[in-house]
Image (tube, grey):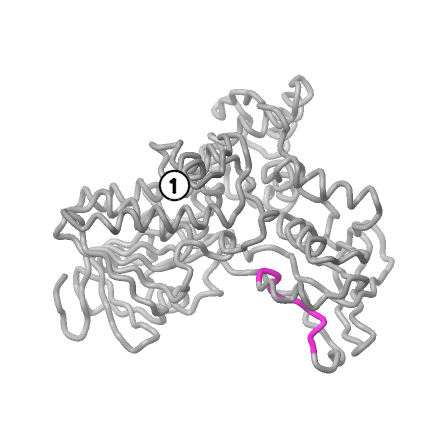
Amino acid sequence: MVQLENALVYDVIVVGSGFSAIAVTCNLIQRLPAKATIAIVGDDPGFGRGTAYRTELYLHRLNVPAGRMSLFPDRPESFVEWLNSRGSPLSEGDFASRNDYGLYLRDTLAALLRKRDDRCRVDFVKAKATGCVERYGASLGFLLGNGDEIAGKNVVLCLGVGNAGLPVDPVGEPAPGRSRIVRNPWRLSWLRRVAATDKVVILGSGLTMIDQVLALRTFGHRGSIDVLSRRGLAPLGHARTVITPIKIDVHTLPKTISAILNVLREKADRSEDWRAVMDGLRPVTQELWKRLSHDERSRFLRHALPWWSIHRHRVAPDVFDKFDGLIRDDVVRFHAGFLKSIELRGVAGVVARYRARGTRKIAEIGADWLINCTGMERAGIGHSPLLKEMMRLNLIATDPLGLGIQVDAHSSVVTPIGKAPGRVFAVGALTAGQYWEITAVPDIRVQARAVAEGIARSM
């Protein structure tokens, strides 16, 4: 590490504090020479755990079996071995808690950092990168929220996505002394304020919705729960037994979404379980996405994405059983439609008005609470002041479909005008335009290793 003007210059700067950042950091520590220097820039005190892996409720479970959740693709047994070492005898096909996974990430990084001999230097900079400067020649500089500046010869952008905002702005008068709207359900303190018989309406019907419904029941809620989403679809469950994936050769598939879906439906009809087709697609999804034209990708996002999501991103079998039981008992009720307005009515609660799907009828749902479970925002530039500044400086370019930023096949950032100062990479959700399937651990860990190997070779 060298001093340049007012900035410390590192060999690598990792910007972010979620899973992507910890995956990149662990791989870099294992591969860089002892003389190398790394700075991890992020203001989240739970580095590496993010929102998903910080929850302490055991019912908040991973949606991927433990045997596929190792931080390292070449050591698939790592997470299961960690669980067993802590007295949690789960097998590779079981679904662990998200909190346990967050602790596993913490312990794995700590173990690497404890090996001080022949290890590169790692500095944790607890600050948000707020701006970017180009004056360092072969390095890229960053302005930090604490007033400092640092620069990196290699930069890895691991900026994830935040909780999506409400689809419409509420109107009316809030209840005196408390809000009736929960904008971010992962701030779990709201659960303690909901009375046992309160009526709840949830916007969004994905994985976040299931997590919060079961959390409500755990905290003693016994009232009705209405769920509103555009199509009224909910995630499906994983199989209770091992399913053998059907091998799929993407090079033999058609090149239009409608024709591809017809082929997949035929395969599902001929298979013992439709999950065999989805699991067969998993290892080749990125290759399939690369083969699609811009128009076909756009068509997929407009028409097929909701059905892809509920079949691809499934929940643990026992979690699905609990949730399905609430539907059968009419505790959870689904509504399909387009949200038109949210009205606060003081002590009377909140009313969500929507146009029922397939009709012009305006219906409404009255409740004591409205919970925003519309999921995570789609990766983009607008949510990050840093990315907006980098966009202004032509250091990054937005993906044509709004799926993050443009990168090449090596996760190297593509700029609108030539080469950026230093070497800039992106890992995780920001690269969805190139890879599509790049939000789950099994995919990100492969990308993180590849980026770390590329940086190590350059040094």
> Residue at coordinates 49% horizontally, 38% vertically from top-left?
88
Circle 1 is placed at which residue position?
Answer: 71
Is residue 459 visible in the rendered image? The answer is: no
> Residue at coordinates 54% horizontally, 33% vertically from top-left?
94
Q: Position of residue 362 (x, y in %)?
A: 85, 61
Image side of residue 352 versus residue 216, left or right: right
Q: Position of residue 257 (x, y in %)?
A: 60, 35
Image side of residue 349 versus residue 19, left or right: right
Image side of residue 289 versus residue 17, left or right: right
| Total marks placed | 1
Secondary structure under the numbered disc 1 in the rendered image:
loop
Q: In this view, does 351 lie above or below 295?
A: below
**Which amino acid, mark 1?**
Leu
Q: Viewer-proximal residue, 360 or 64? A: 64
Q: Quick one: quadrant of the N terminus? A: bottom left
Q: Viewer-proximal residue, 211 or 265? A: 211
Residue 289 in the magenta stretch? The answer is no
Quarter holding residue 259: top right
> Furthest-front residue in view?
87
Q: Position of residue 407 (x, y in %)?
A: 37, 49
At label 1, counting other C-alpha atoms closer than 10 Å, the crowd grade (few under 14, some 14-19, many 20 or more) is many
Residue 181 in the magenta stretch? The answer is yes
Is residue 245 visible in the rendered image? The answer is: yes
> Where are the magenta residues, as a range?
178-186
Q: What is the chief secondary structure element of the magenta stretch?
A: loop
Quarter holding residue 18: bottom left
Q: Position of residue 219 (x, y in %)?
A: 69, 58
